[in-house]
Amino acid sequence: MTEHDPPKLELVMQLVVTCSDPESPGGAGASKDGQRTDDGVTIIIHNKGLSYGGNGRDGWHYRLAPEFIAPKGKYDWLNRALFISTLVDVPASMRLARGPHENDRLIQIYRVN
């Protein structure tokens, strides 16, 4: 089989996501999920994905297909691309979780070119 125009992946962002107990919405710049953005821009992400493996905690692999909904401006390029991402435990040096009700995940997002 001959490949014609095979896709390439470009790492475009790496997110350390801290999952916690639900927050109450409210306050300036809050989304329906509470205050989440560093620069005041709310970007909605819908993820669909697969998990496979299952040989103990380290045996699981996750592949996600994030869809972004970003407002016009510096992040609207997210609306015009196809992405795939991985989800893994955060290396110790990158952890942000501070309490017993928080845990971190590292999401590496690749644009498909």
Image (cartoon, rainbow, N blue to C red):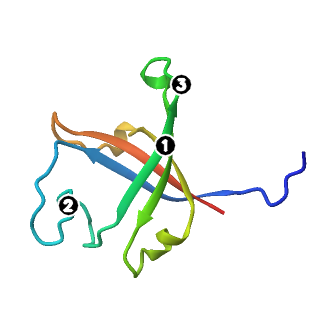
At label 1, counting other C-alpha atoms closer than 10 Å, the crowd grade (few under 14, some 14-19, many 20 or more) is few
Circle 1 or circle 3, nearest the eye: 1
Q: Residues within 10 Å of mark 2 (few under 14, many from 20)?
A: few
- The answer to whether the residues at label 3 and label 2 have Cβ atoms under 8 Å apart is no
Pick out the residue farthest to the top: 55
Q: Would you name the residue on which mark 1 appears? A: 49
Would you say 67 lies left or right of 3 here? left
Residue placed under numbered mark 3 in the picture: 53
Residue 5: percent from left, percent from top: 80, 61
Callout in the foreground (3, 2): 2
User: In this rendering, would 49 be left or right of 71?
Assistant: right
**Nearer to me, 7 or 95:** 7
92 up-or-down from 26: above or below? above
Residue at coordinates 17% horizontally, 58% vertically from top-left? 34
Kindly identify the residue that appears in the image at 77 percent across and 56 percent down.
6
Nearer to me, 20 or 104: 20
SS type, badge 2: loop
29 in relation to 106, above or below: below
**Mark 1 and mark 2: Cα distance apart in space:** 23 Å
Q: What residue do we see at 50% from left, 17% from top? A: 55
N-terminal label among 3 and 2: 2
Lateral position of residue 63 relative to residue 1, left or right: left
Image coords of residue 14 (percent x, y): 45, 54
Mark 2 lies on residue: 32
